[in-house]
Amino acid sequence: MIICFAHYKGGTGKTTSCLSVAGFLALRGYKVLVVDLDPQGNATSGLGVDKDTINKNMYHVMKKNEEISRIIVAGPVKGLHIAPAKQELELAALRAYRRKTEAQVLINALEKVKGYYDFILIDTPPVHGHFIINGLAAADKVIVVLDPGVFALEGIETLQNAFGNFFDKLGLKLSIDAALITRAPGFKLFRKNYALEMKKEVEILLGRKVYMIPYSDNVYDCHVWGLPISHLKPGSKVGRAYSKVVDDIIEEFETKHKVKGMLEEEDEV
Ligand SMILES: Nc1ncnc2c1ncn2[C@@H]1O[C@H](COP(=O)(O)OP(=O)(O)OP(=O)(O)O)[C@@H](O)[C@H]1O
Ligand SMILES: [Mg+2]
């Protein structure tokens, strides 16, 4: 299953969510690949990989100069690999992506390694463009990541409308499957819990499941240690919230597998 974490607003928690979900999936014994499609390379360093030590990275894959299998590295977390990124990836974004083939560079690159992994998680950058389009086009499932603010809410509609039209024109499908509201404050202001109000609004807007991830300094510790929350503080409030998201992802994954297995058995009879 390929999952893309997206929102073109900066700093909403895409990388943190991608790494937290990846960590819990690995902890439960699944084989996971994180694809860092952001020239900032936060997912790469967030998984304890030193960007200065890597040479070939997603830049070479997106330029179609290298096979993705040759740039994948193993970080400190068992069962979790990373296709790293660094600043030079920005250069690859300058290529045009008007044609369908340009939106399908990543999906084609992943085709060769898809069979090795149960889950491939894609972290995208906060800009409209080549990488977010490739990330969305490669995904079976899109999780939009929001912070609890009005601007982020406005962004969802744009994400659906702007990219929806673009994808229609290219003959590709785009569907947002779930939303995460990160850094949700637990307190009430003027007797209202704004994060909860926002959850209700997003549920109506998307008609999809919305998860709340509480605010916590533990997230900062994870970035410092280069480990996902699953491997630093799995029992913390944030850890439990991401673990719940992973429960649902695994349920969907296992159901799909079961049905696929049953259909294949029927075919054999
Ligand atoms: N649940 C949380 N509690 C507290 N801080 C958080 C939480 N989630 C994320 N953060 C912090 O918010 C900031 C942005 O998070 P992150 O880098 O994951 O966002 P992003 O959407 O990937 O950003 P960008 O758009 O730059 O790629 C980071 O400093 C991170 O430590
Ligand atoms: Mg990020």
Image (cartoon, helix red, strand yellow):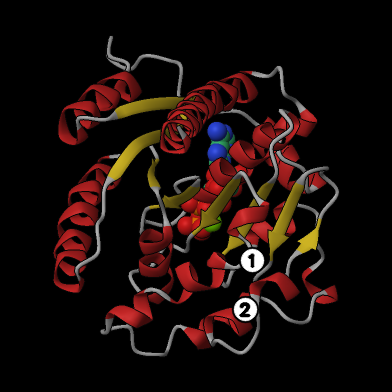
Q: Residue at x 65, y 50 (%)?
A: 117
Cβ–Cβ under 8 Å for marks 2 and 1: yes
Residue 108 spot, x, y in % from top left: 48, 72
What SS does tag 1 mark? loop
Q: Is residue 37 among the parts visible in the rendering?
A: no
* Residue identifier under label 1: 41
**192 vs 130, nearest the viewer:** 130
Determine the residue located farthest toward the front in the rendered image: 269
Where is 156 relative to 50, above or below?
A: above
Where is 49 relative to 218, above or below?
A: below
**Numbered tag placed on residue 134 in the rendering:** none
Q: Is residue 84 left or right of residue 155?
A: right
Mark 2–mark 1 Cα distance, whole angstroms, equals 7 Å
Pick whichever of labels 2 and 1 is earlier in the sequence.
1
Residue 47 spot, x, y in % from top left: 74, 52
Residue 206: quadrant of the picture: top left
Q: Is residue 140 left or right of residue 92?
A: left
**Numbered tag placed on residue 87 in the rendering:** 2
Q: Residues within 10 Å of mark 2 (few under 14, many from 20)?
A: few
Residue 87 spot, x, y in % from top left: 62, 78
Q: Residue at x 71, y 52 (%)?
A: 46
Q: Is residue 67 among the parts visible in the rendering?
A: yes
